[in-house]
Image (tube, rainbow, N blue to C red):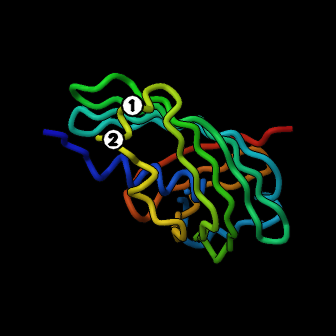
Amino acid sequence: MLRCNALPIAFAISFSTFTAAQTNDATVFEQKNLYGRWHCNHFMEDAGTRLKVDYDINYFADGRANGSGTLLLRMQNFPEIEYSISNRSTWVLSGRSLILSSQAFTLVNRSHPELDNFLNLESMFPQNIRESSRILELTKSTLKAQSESYGGIYTCSKIS
């Protein structure tokens, strides 16, 4: 029997639709610090399921964002599966919240496509996903955020 934990799936949606985090509530973040290309890594483990994401996302001043990367998923009784992820979305920075709305989301199994008959993650994702994260830190070189949907924290570094 296939046991698919919903937490990693929620993370994959959140991470690909967005990448941001928390500090003092009085903190105001400069939106212009978000503009540009970021490299993000995240790892999480829950109930025997491991998820590792290596993702680049580009935030444009006009409120668009494009991202792509790799997701590695390891579940009990399955080999590690490598997916390519790509996403096109819009974003809004509102106070301490970064809100992304996905317009196009793609998740392709690159390592074991034969498993898509049992575990087709892309079919589990709606195309129009809205995700909000609480910004913990946003500087010219660091973006750290906490997903409001699953609570995970991830950090990104600006790509020169």
- Quadrant of image for the N terminus: top left
Q: Vertically, is 104 above or below 112?
A: below
Q: Is residue 45 left or right of residue 125?
A: left
* Residue 82 visible from this viewpoint: yes
Disc 1: which residue:
114
Q: Is residue 91 left or right of residue 115?
A: right
Question: Which residue is the extreme one toward the top?
Answer: 79
Report the label total: 2
Which is nearer the eye, 81 or 93? 81
Q: Is residue 81 left or right of residue 35?
A: left
Amino acid at the residue labelled 1? Glu
Rendered residue at 44%/32% (across/down):
113
Which is nearer the eye, 8 or 152? 8
Task: Identify the secondary structure beneath mark 1.
Answer: helix
* Circle 1/circle 2 CB separation < 8 Å: yes
The residue carrying pointer 2 sits among few (fewer than 14), some (14 to 19) or many (20 or more) residues within 10 Å by Cα, namely few
Disc 2: which residue:
117
Mark 1 vs mark 2, CA separation in Å = 7 Å
The residue carrying pointer 1 sits among few (fewer than 14), some (14 to 19) or many (20 or more) residues within 10 Å by Cα, namely few
Amino acid at the residue labelled 2? Asn
Query: Residue 122, how many percent across, how many down?
Result: 46, 51
Q: Is residue 118 left or right of residue 81?
A: left
Query: Residue 31, how many percent across, how many down?
Result: 77, 67
Rendered residue at 40%/33% (across/down):
73
* Residue 20 visible from this viewpoint: no
Rendered residue at 28%/26% (across/down):
78
Task: Identify the secondary structure beneath mark 2.
Answer: helix
Which is nearer the eye, 22 or 98? 98
- Quadrant of image for the C terminus: top right
